[in-house]
């Protein structure tokens, strides 16, 4: 039976009490740690944070690569009662600077080789301790420092996601949100203490981070892979690790397919995928590559972690669907008039349940756009901004974003952010950025530009410029140079006409 914990820290604390000698994690360096040792290391990290002025409710940024040390940092910040704020090490300095200024952290936990970048990105008027989790001193006791100082409505985590303005928004998640998400997803995935979860996706991504919370909830082991940059070596380690569960994103599938036949992957009993909806051809490919594994296709947003999953028994006949609502969640679609439809309709997807975020940090305007009063007293439900179809049996089909935010590999990309970077190139006069359908990523970025007379940069030069200023997912796959843009009767760029030729 899955434990019904109230606080996130109880996931690890309970395992340390009941199975202290069970393996909690391992990485490619063979650095294996038990639940008992991870618990004590987390207390030591929490103590170090406290000694550096971190209080319950303070934000602590985790600017770290995938590793067992990341796990120590994650649970240590949680044990301190801090709001864990994971930030990808691929985040560009300008965006990292904005996140620092927005969330006003009390401390940063970093790796030796990410500390300098964190220091450069820190606003000049901010003087923060940048700490590592190395050389931890054995704590005096084994009690969780924040126990008794928080309630389940307190924030446990904040994850930054892109918005339509290009500025990231901090998604606020309470302990209740986090524990409810762990329980719900574990219920249908069926994680157990006998499982080893092979994690290559970034632990700073909510899908990666929740592998840690779900593993600790049931006592599973996590094998932490640094990344998926070298698929041949990663698949070799997957084969040798004996891992039973392999969470992936669709972009990994072509890389897996190139090397999978060289290894025995029969130990993998479960494949789960989120981010972009799995294309039917990708589902077929996964079932061929992992014939002994059950495939779970899932869909979700950072604002509520997961929305839907496809029961494996239904997958063969509904490959275009992203499934039904996850346990303890209700969903429906609404049309533009606000009419609610639980099935057989198309409209904006609305989510109700304990996983729905508390709002966006320091952003009441955007919070009000997404969180609206529900039918029950005091309740708020999430308007996702996703245009979806619910069939007559309640299975969901994703159609598009209802705003101009793109969804690539499950992460949001603002066209305006890409346009601003292109316009900062001296030779670019105008820029239009939009998304095009992508079988693997969901969408990819496509850009149209006009140039200042007398200049002649190549599309590659413009893409390289974007690559030096944007995260990889936001870099345009294609940059087209046009002589001029079509305009409407008011003289404004006719965006709809320009993009319609690609539909």
Image: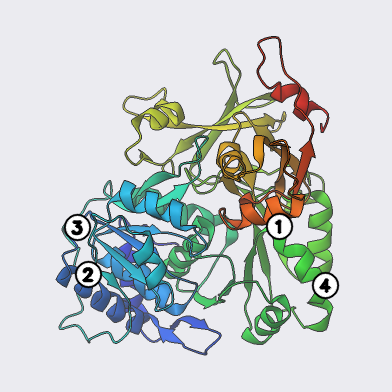
**Neighbour class for label 2 at 10 Å: few (<14), some, many (≥20)?**
many
Badge 1 is on which residue?
A: 250
Spatial CA distance of label 2 from label 3 is 10 Å
Q: Residue 426: which quarter of the image?
A: top right
**Left of 168 or right of it: where is 60?**
left
Which residue is drawn at the image coordinates 84% and 78% (left, top)? 261
**Neighbour class for label 4 at 10 Å: few (<14), some, many (≥20)?**
few
| First in sequence: mark 1 vs mark 2 | 2
| First in sequence: mark 4 vs mark 1 | 1
Count of numbered tags: 4
Label 2 sits on a secondary structure element that is helix
Spatial CA distance of label 4 from label 1 is 14 Å
Mark 1 and mark 4 in contact (Cβ < 8 Å)? no
For discs 1 and 2, the disc positioned in front in the rendered view: 2
Spatial CA distance of label 1 from label 2 is 37 Å
Position above or below: 204 against 391 = below
- Residue 291, visible in the rendered structure: no
Spatial CA distance of label 1 from label 3 is 38 Å
Image spot of residue 474 (x, y percent)? 62, 49
Q: Which mark is residue 56?
A: 3
**Left of 500 or right of it: where is 211?**
left
Label 3 sits on a secondary structure element that is loop
Of 81 and 254, the residue lying toward us: 254
């Amino acid at each position: 039976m899955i434990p019904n914990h109230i606080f996130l820290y109880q996931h690890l604390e309970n395992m340390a009490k009941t199975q202290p000698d069970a393996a909690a994690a391992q990485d490619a360096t063979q650095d294996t740690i038990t639940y008992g040792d991870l618990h004590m290391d987390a207390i030591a990290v929490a103590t170090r944070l406290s000694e550096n002025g971190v209080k319950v409710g303070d934000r602590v940024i985790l600017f770290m690569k995938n590793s067992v040390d990341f796990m120590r940092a994650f649970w240590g910040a949680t044990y301190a009662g801090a709001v864990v704020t994971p930030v990808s090490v691929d985040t560009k300095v300008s965006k990292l600077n904005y996140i620092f200024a927005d969330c006003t952290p009390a401390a940063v936990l970093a790796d030796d080789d990410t500390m300098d970048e964190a220091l450069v990105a820190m606003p000049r008027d901010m003087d923060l301790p940048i700490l590592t989790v190395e050389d931890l001193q054995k704590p005096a006791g084994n009690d969780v420092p924040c126990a008794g100082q928080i309630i389940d409505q307190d924030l446990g985590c904040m994850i930054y996601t892109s918005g339509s303005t290009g500025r990231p928004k901090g998604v606020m998640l309470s302990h209740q949100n986090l524990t409810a998400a762990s329980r719900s997803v574990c219920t249908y995935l069926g994680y157990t203490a006998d499982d080893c979860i092979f994690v290559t996706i970034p632990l700073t991504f909510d899908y990666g981070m929740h592998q840690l919370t779900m593993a600790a909830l049931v006592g599973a082991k996590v094998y932490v892979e640094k990344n998926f940059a070298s698929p041949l070596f990663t698949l070799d380690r997957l084969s040798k690790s004996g891992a039973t569960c392999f969470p992936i994103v669709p972009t990994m599938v072509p890389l897996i397919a190139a090397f999978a036949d060289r290894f025995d992957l029969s130990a993998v009993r479960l494949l789960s995928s989120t981010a972009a909806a799995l294309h039917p051809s990708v589902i077929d490919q996964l079932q061929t590559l992992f014939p002994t594994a059950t495939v779970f296709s899932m869909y979700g947003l950072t604002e509520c972690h997961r929305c839907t999953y496809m029961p494996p028994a239904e997958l063969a006949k509904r490959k275009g669907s992203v499934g039904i609502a996850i346990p303890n969640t209700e969903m429906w679609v609404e049309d533009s008039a606000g009419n609610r439809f639980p099935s057989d309709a198309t409209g904006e997807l609305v989510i109700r349940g304990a996983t729905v975020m508390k709002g966006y940090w320091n952003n009441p305007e955007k919070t009000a756009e997404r969180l609206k009063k529900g039918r029950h007293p005091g309740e708020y439900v999430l308007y996702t901004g996703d245009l979806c179809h619910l069939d007559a049996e309640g299975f969901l089909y994703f159609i598009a974003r209802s705003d101009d935010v793109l969804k690539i590999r499950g992460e949001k990309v603002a066209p305006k952010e890409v346009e601003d970077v292109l316009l900062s190139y001296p030779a670019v006069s105008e820029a239009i950025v939009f998304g095009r359908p992508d079988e693997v990523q969901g969408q990819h970025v496509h850009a149209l530009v006009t140039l200042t007379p007398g200049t002649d940069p190549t599309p590659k030069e413009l893409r390289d410029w974007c690559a030096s200023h944007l995260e990889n997912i936001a870099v345009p796959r294609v940059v087209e140079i046009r002589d001029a843009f079509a305009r409407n009767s008011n003289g404004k760029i006719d965006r709809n006409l320009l993009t319609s030729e690609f539909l």
